Amino acid sequence: MRQSSRAAANPLWGGFIVLMVVATLLPLWTPWPALALLPGVALGALVLLGRAPSWGLYAIVFLIPFGNFRQLGGPLADVKIHWVLALVLLVVLALRLLREQQAVGLLRSNLWPWWGLFLAVSLFSTLWSAYPLEAGQQVVLTLVAMAFFALVLVFLDAHALVRQLPVVIVASVSLGSMFALIGYLFGVSWFAIEVGDDFTRSTGVTSDPNNLAMLIIFVLPFVVFWLAHGRRPLVRLAALVLLAINLGAMVVSFSRSGGLVTALLLATLLVVNARGLRPRHLGLLFAGGAMALLVALLLVPQGYWERQATLTASDTDRSINRRASYLVVAGDAFEQRPLIGHGPGTFRELYAKTDWAQRFDREGATNRRFAHNTYLEVVVGTGVLGLICFLGLLAVAARNLWLARRLLLARGDPYHAAQVLHYLLAFLFLLLYMAMFSDVFQKYMLLSLGVSQLWLRFALSVADEGTG
């Protein structure tokens, strides 16, 4: 039996070796001989990530804010680094599922039914769509999102939730925020864009100032958790510096919606964390807040306050009027096909054919505009059925986090319960901002879906240990 299995394996290994040799030699006769290194690098990555797949997932999470700097470059300029990492991790996942029964168990989640329903509605809507190509691409993105969700479930654990993952998230976003400040202060075009003759908005390492604002909103609860619950003075000091950097980047993004959501988030975080503070700490907190407000009034550019004031100038602000037109187009589209929509991801195609698109036409810009509202994108694309499935997915994830917090409190673990609460706040305020930003498969949202299941799994294991 062993001899027959070896005989079967030898041709496979022989074929693999021949394939590697051919893939290595062929690029030497092309204009890009450096590609000869690619097969060896890919094999090395497969071996390394096979031993420690969580590090590959950390790398993907770290790259989330770096939207403008994820391409491989050269002849592979259209290939992104996180795509390669995800592909390697999926190979590792497939091998684990074949060999280990435990890996199959780790895939269990109460979110899969909602994923399946959303995918089914998207497929059905695509069949009836006037834009099958665009809708089909969105269905593929749904499958990619489900694959990323599976990677989080299998390759992260409780230790990652408590320690490594928050560090990776905060480090990457804060690094992007530092570049945003550099771009604004020193006029570095890589990290900022010129909106007018005398108006600059920072993008950091993302492609859009509003996207930068969204990332900062997600990261603030993690920073404040360290500030309020850090067990060492050095951790709290680092958190204070990181808070200043990210708030500064929020300002130079000049995102009006980002500023409003950030103010609401900071007020919520203050209320949440003030409960456990002693009276003398409260005094210091309010004194520090007053000082921070004074510094903000002195250091924040006057243009920031002027831009925030335009929120009430709907009659004269072209941007606000354009966003209002998205609501009108979405309403008309919904009336036409309320049940299953026009096909996922088709709002841009619908808007481009309206008179509104011509009215708000901008030189050098496409008329295929996003709705600037993720939920409008979903309901126009997949109708009421798709929106119910999408909201059900988000609601179950939020419930997972809330239930995990309650279980940890019941077990007498206030530290991890507070950490779960800050994960939940990051998730909820991200969802709030998504009502002003179009990104159906926002990566931190997808990460939070998987993390919600992991926290619930961790809390249930702690509760079982307590009863046992």
Image: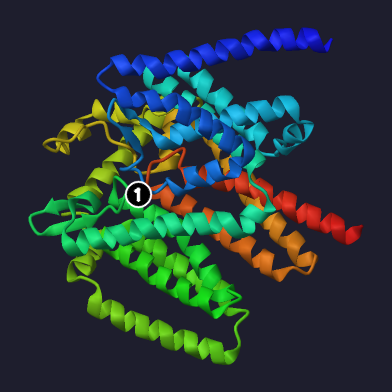
Q: Position of residue 350 (x, y in %)?
A: 31, 27
Residue in front for this viewpoint, 9 or 356 = 9
Identify the residue shown where x is 79% and y is 65%: 410
As drawn, is 370 to the left or to the right of 444? left
Q: Is residue 377 above or below residue 318?
A: above
- The total of numbered circles placed on residues is 1
- Looking at numbered disc 1 in the image, what kind of residue is underneath it? Asn
Q: Would you name the residue on which mark 1 appears?
A: 211
As drawn, is 144 to the left or to the right of 288? right
As drawn, is 255 to the left or to the right of 167? left
For the N terminus, which image quadrant? top right
Identify the residue shown where x is 58% and y is 23%: 120
Q: Return the residue found at the far left.
A: 197
Q: Is residue 359 above or below residue 59?
A: above
**Would you identify the image quadrant in which residue 24 lies?**
top left
Q: Position of residue 44 (x, y in %)?
A: 52, 32
Q: Position of residue 256 (x, y in %)?
A: 30, 59
For the C terminus, which image quadrant? bottom right
**Would you identify the image quadrant in which residue 6 lies?**
top right
Q: Is residue 412 above or below residue 381?
A: below
- Visible in this render: residue 142? no
Identify the residue shown where x is 30% and y is 39%: 326
Residue in front for this viewpoint, 29 or 244 = 29
Secondary structure beneath label 1: helix
Q: Position of residue 214 (x, y in %)?
A: 39, 53
Identify the residue shown where x is 58% and y is 91%: 279
